[in-house]
Amino acid sequence: MSDIALTPPVPVTTEAPLIRALLIGVALIFVALFLFAPLVTVFVEALRQGWVAAIDALRLPDAQAAIRMTLTIAAIAVPINAAFGIAAAWAITKFDFPGKAFLITLIDLPFSVSPVVAGLMLVLLFGANSTLGGWLIANDMPIVFAFPGIVLATLFVTFPFVARELIPVMIEQGRAEEEAALTLGASGWRIFFTVTLPNIRWALLYGVLLCNARAMGEFGAVAVVSGKIRGETATMPTMVEMFYNEYLAVAAFTLAAVLAMLALLTLLLKSLLEWRHADLLAATRRH
Amino acid sequence: MYRTIQIGGHALAQGIFLRSLGDGRIEIDAGHARLSGHPVATPRSSETVSFHSAFRKALTGGHLRGGLLAGLTGLVLAFGGTTPAAAQDSVEILNVSYDPTREFYREYNDLFNAWWTAQGNAPVTIRQSHGGAGAQARAVIDGLEATVVTLALSADIDAISERTGLFPADWQSRLPHNSSPYTSTIVFLVREGNPRGIEDWDDLVADGVQVITPNPKTSGGARWNFLAAWAYAERNDLDPAEFVGAMYRNVPVLDTGARGSTTTFTQRGIGDVLLAWENEAFLALAELGEDAFDIVVPSVSILAEPPVTLVDGNITSDAQRAAAEAYLQHLYSPEAQALALSHYYRAWDTSLAAPEDAARFPELDLVTIADFGGWPVVQPEYFGDGGIFDQIYEE
């Protein structure tokens, strides 16, 4: 027994407690100053004239239309991008084909392209001065400065979120389980629903939540193609700007607060799911 | 004093009151012609005069002389004999406007709808879009389906006509006063007590003074600002290019629209002086408190004429055309003129305005765009690619 030497526990970090406290303190102050304080300001400004004024502001027809608009767009853009993200991630991680690296780069394109450029691309493609756009407008199917253009702009900027979340997870998981299922005679759809989907569900959920947050919050690309028609093509973020420019500070900040709350709700939902299924998450080491 | 008369149908004309004709009609001087008709907003006689007979009467009576005839014919064609929309389909109008008109049109749309439905028409759904005038014109060119455009200056509306052919190039003669139902001018907004002692244009080129004005490439108001500064330099025998160049070197931020600049100055606290539409400056005082800012009126400024027109090519039905034409025409009615005055615009007809609204505007020396040769000359020469603004700003 004597030859088993018990090594004393070595602390992982060597910093003195004071330095550790200092580092943590700096991080907390930074978060408080740059994340928490601005967020609180939005809520304070919204409630500056009391709850009644804030609620009245949300009752404004323009505000209601903007909220409806944003929710509708998210309801369209998020499922489409989720389906596309799964398909892309599936193709990229489970199959080998030429041009794979190029496809991955292409998926990232919306991350690197400025949203304003994304909006202008749509205007150039579908505007009255392009052949396609001219024909569409002549046939009473306008794309830009109308609902479809805003959906397209949102789709473009939220394109990579789901695929980007899934690809690393699926690469890490490898193909062994799918191949095993295949040798046991499972069909493609069955493999997907019983093997792949359960494995990626947390990453998928995370991607969908991020995608949703961005879809509801996108300003730049939407502002270019919206035409700023009140009550018709104004989303929540563009309406916030309009209210602010019209000296309707309470309405602007109340709508901004609702937008912030939607984002917070998204994060809360994610944390709640992580906490609720902590054991499952630990087992699969997924997000 | 300016009065508005009805010649028949929805046709209105506006001019300086000359005399009462005794039968309820009055005679006015509308620029180059004398017109007579019933003043709007006074109880009218039960006799309804058809537009055409009134027109003929005016012609035979010799009240109408050359000059305005072409313009008036356009007006007749556009507005004479429009019948109330028979179809009860809901009619929609999209008004694409510039930045500072938000508050005015919000109220005008209600006023118009109340009047329009009182005439026995179905209510009209009016949608609004606001932004820098240049950017808004660009959007209409790119396919934003405006029914009417109400922009900051005629050059932007000219650009739409030129590039799309959606309405004729002589659109500006279709409505009275160069199609400008209201006008404004450019004044200075300074911080309370005027700490930098800014009194006139030459104080803007002093070292260390920060001037806030939007980008003339995208904002109509900014082009009026530019020309007003130019006019001051010319009046005072300074080299205009050098003077305006020095002023722009004092500009820390160029926003895209007038309202953006106002927020930069008033809410973000940047700059010592804001070059603003007079109506925008009064609005900032009303919204943000008289004790925060002062208005300074320079010795020279420019008469800014923000015109309106119908985008004929985007009209989809007769009912929509009738409503849209009436929508623009009604801007000249005394009620709408009073509303414009209450929103700090220099409107023409003060007969229904509150006395304090009509008396608010300081008298000052106003140059006009015609002194510069008109927008078709000014736009390319000063604000086109490689134009005077580009040369100045590159320095």
Image (cartoon, rainbow, N blue to C red):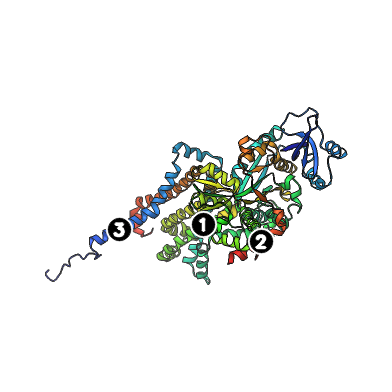
Residue positioned most to the top = B46
- Of circles 2 and 3, the one toward us is 2
- Of circles 3 and 1, the one toward us is 1
Give how far across and how far down residue A39 sits, in percent.
42, 49
Badge 2 marks a residue whose secondary structure is helix
* Residue B325 tag number: none
Of residues B99 and B367, the one nearer the viewer is: B367
Tell me which amino acid carries mark 3: Ile
Q: Is residue A5 above or below residue A75?
A: below
Q: Is residue B18 above or below residue B191?
A: above
Q: How busy is the neighbourhood of tag 2: few (under 14 within 10 Å), some, or many (20 plus)?
A: many
Q: Quadrant of residue B322?
A: top right
Check chain identity for marks 2 and 1: say if they share one. yes
* Residue A24 tag number: 3
Q: How busy is the neighbourhood of tag 3: few (under 14 within 10 Å), some, or many (20 plus)?
A: few
* Residue B382 tag number: 2
Give how far across and how far down residue A66 sits, in percent.
54, 45
The alpha-carbon separation of the residues under discs 3 and 1 comes to 42 Å
Check chain identity for marks 3 and 1: say if they share one. no
